[in-house]
Amino acid sequence: MRIITGRTRWAPVGVVGLAHRYPCLLFFAAASLLPAGCGGPVPVGEVIVYTSVDQFYSEPIFREFESATGIEVRPVYDVEAVKTTGLVQRILSEASHPQADVFWNNEFAQSIYLAEKGVLSPLGEVEASGIREAFRDSAGIWIPLGCRYRVFLIRKGLEDPPKDVEDLPTVLSRLRVGMAQPAFGTTATWAASLRAQWGPERSSAYLSRLVEGGIRVVAGNSLVRDMVVSGALDLGLTDSDDACMALRRGAPVEVLPARQGGAGPMPIPGSLALIRGAPHRKQALQLIRYLLRPEVEQQLIEIGAFQASVRVDGPRSSCIPEEPGPFPLSLSAIADELAGSHLEISRIFLR
Amino acid sequence: MKRRPIIPTGARILSLIVIFLPLMALLADPQSGWDFHVLLLDGRRAALLGRSLIFSAGAAFFCSLAGFAAALGFFSQERWAGFRWIPLVLLALPPSLHALAWDLALSRANQFIGNIAGLRIAHEGWGLALWVQVMTLLPLSLGFGMLGLDRLPKEMLEAGRVFQNDEQVFRKLAFPLLRPWIIGSAALVFILSLTDYTIPALAGCTSYALEVFSEFAAGHDPGRSLLLSIPLLLPVFFASLLILRPLRLLLRSPGHAAGKSLRIPGGRRWWFTRAGLLLLAIQLLVPLVMLGGECGSWRVLAQSLRDSRAEILYSILLSSTAALLALIPAVFLSGIFRKRATQPGMAMIALLPLALPASLIGIGWSRLAMIVAPDSGVLRAFLPVGALSSRFAAVAILVLLAWSSFFDRDSFDALALFRESRLMAWIHIGIPLALPALGASAAMVFAFSLTEIGASLMVLPPGRMTLSVRLYNALHYGATAQVAALGLILAAICLGAGAIAVCLLRRKGPL
């Protein structure tokens, strides 16, 4: 190590001295200013969207909205790796001084939760016609947009696949079956729907049978898809967007609706909401109206973000070959069971 | 003569802001319920904690052993002297990518083995989780091992060789001096393994960290998550004592001249170093070959590079700034410029952000911004830097503590007498002396920040995205080629940063 001594003349003191002695600090100083400069007060023609819809799906839609209106969309994306809880927590922590204008969620349970917490603003002035009654929020706080389903992704040519989630425990002895960790995301919502449909005892016994039968519990729905594609699993219970993505890529797999107790598969409608106290309310409403246009929903179905419309007689992706059929529970009834279900899930799966 | 403290008061204030204020803001979160009953662990949680402790201890043991063996083998090669830092680059790959690479490797291996013998290696279980965890954190242990070897007093070893054979010299002289470094690396691997659920979860195993996060995901209650994290904090505290204790012992001995190489005693231990080198080669090659193979072609890599230009630039700036900011609390809390070199209580609290779910650190900063200046765009843009600094300042502190035993305090004091102010003494003498340690700390924080998502996601400015968020989005989308390309880009960024750091440090003398 070399220590510089014997200099008779000092460089300028203080911060200037530091910069003089260590010019690389100038880079870091500039670096720290760049993000700051980019995060300054938002101009009028902007809208801030917190979205859990994958960037690959939502970004092209935002760009089209920008072209059509001149309003810049500044999104914050969620990632599956943090179990899509990041944005919800962020909205809650910013509740006193909201930063976001729109919450575009790819499911419904978190939107119901945020509505209960009072951080969403009613969307009374937004017209959303033709939406199926089962998907409507009675309070009009959020509006559904695009629908996914719980499905079975199976290896092509698999003999005698299960038709109903009730069949899963019985096929575990002959098939390698997997699903995502039910403590998180849409698998947690699915577990809550079992509880709402069958009651706590029966759903608990069912989930216990899955564990005892050796169901493979993996980190996320996309991993379930990847494992079926790679042949590590014969069958996976996952979301239709993940499953249909494998099909679109030409993987040797098939997609079947995961019927539930004789009814249709659990639907997972996406949801759009306006944040209470949104800084750019006018632009936010413009974006919401734009996203609610039937052609945008159709586009989202075509690119694979959703597999069916939330509208009566709306389009459906060819990935879901047959009409899924009605689901007997309301969305709020499912959401109501989430807290109770979590306790059971922890007891059964996190041990 | 009483020695004057030389860290300006401003640095103390900044340290408090970076480490303590976000935690205080978290405590004041209105969402928090403060259900203290969760502190009484039920049987299930106790079992989860026990399993996590065993897993982390196993990872610490095997990782430090393998890292030490690899360092011993790596260090003995004089011709590799300038490239010893290269294996550390893979610290920049997120654990998920290591897991992906090993999963791909297992699939290939199963195809091969299946065709020959009809056997199949399981893609799940604690064994696999342990292996991937060890491979992921091996560069860390390797770094500790090389640091320890670099600081061995060569003269003492040569003198020992006059009277004893190599075996005896190694056993009686070298190993006791290396032990604190091995223990230190084991403790750090233990802490990182205990507080991160990623790899066990990917291998289908449940850990206590996953339990904390699942409670957070279900209840959105930061206070409850904080309380649930306390059982993790206790082992983290004791593990960090294991890091500090040997360092304190080292503080009592004078600094040694850095040796460039060590003649490794031959004979019975050759297989140990060869095994270490083999593991290191596997650790390097499997992710690079698998990701390279998945990436497919240079065209995909170039396309990914073009598409993610903005994210790459933003990630580099964010991580660099966070690395620089983290040095301030690290310098202050490690006390490297003080007579009493460590402030254990403060340093322990600085470890807290490592043991908490990452999102909580982001929420702490978000809450802090809400309290201090809710409408300040500049402050909000600074939040990701703050969150990353808080999260990884502990890493910088540990590196500085490790280095502080070699700080020539007497030279510093002697030279400082001729300077007119504390600040000038610090700028012209303190920083040059500490430059290698500061560079190493910054490099570590940079590497960890580059792949972080939990804390930064909570505070990223709208319209901005880091490279790791893009990578995880691609992972969910199933764009494996793009994931592989982005992973390679991350590794390349770290390689570049490492090369710059090494060049700078060489220019300044220590390497």
Image (cartoon, rainbow, N blue to C red):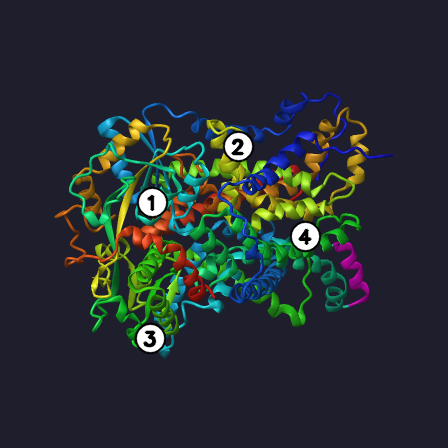
> Residue A240: x percent and y percent?
25, 55
Per the model, the C-alpha gap separating discs 3 and 4 is 47 Å
Q: Quadrant of the N terminus of chain A?
A: top right
Which chain letter goes with mark 4?
B
Residue holding disc 1: A111
Dot 3 lies on which element? Answer: helix
Q: Which residue is nearer to you in this view: B290 or A327?
A: A327
- The structure residue drawn at horizontal position 67% and vertical position 20%, both measured from the top left corner, is A12
Q: Position of residue A21 (x, y in %)?
A: 64, 28
A47 lies above or below B192: above
Image coordinates of residue A141 in percent, x first then y, are 30, 39
Farthest-out residue, bottom: B117
Q: Which residue is mark 3?
A: B115
Q: Which residues are magenta?
A: B153-164
Letter of the chain that mark 1 sits on in the rendering: A
Task: Specify the amino acid type for callout 1.
Answer: Ser
Give the residue number, with chain letter if any, for mark 4.
B150
Q: Is residue B157 magenta?
A: yes
Residue B254 lies, with reference to residue B65, above or below; the image says above
Q: How far apart are the two marked residues, 4 and 2, measured between alpha carbons? A: 47 Å
Q: Main secondary structure of the magenta part?
A: helix
* SS at badge 4: helix
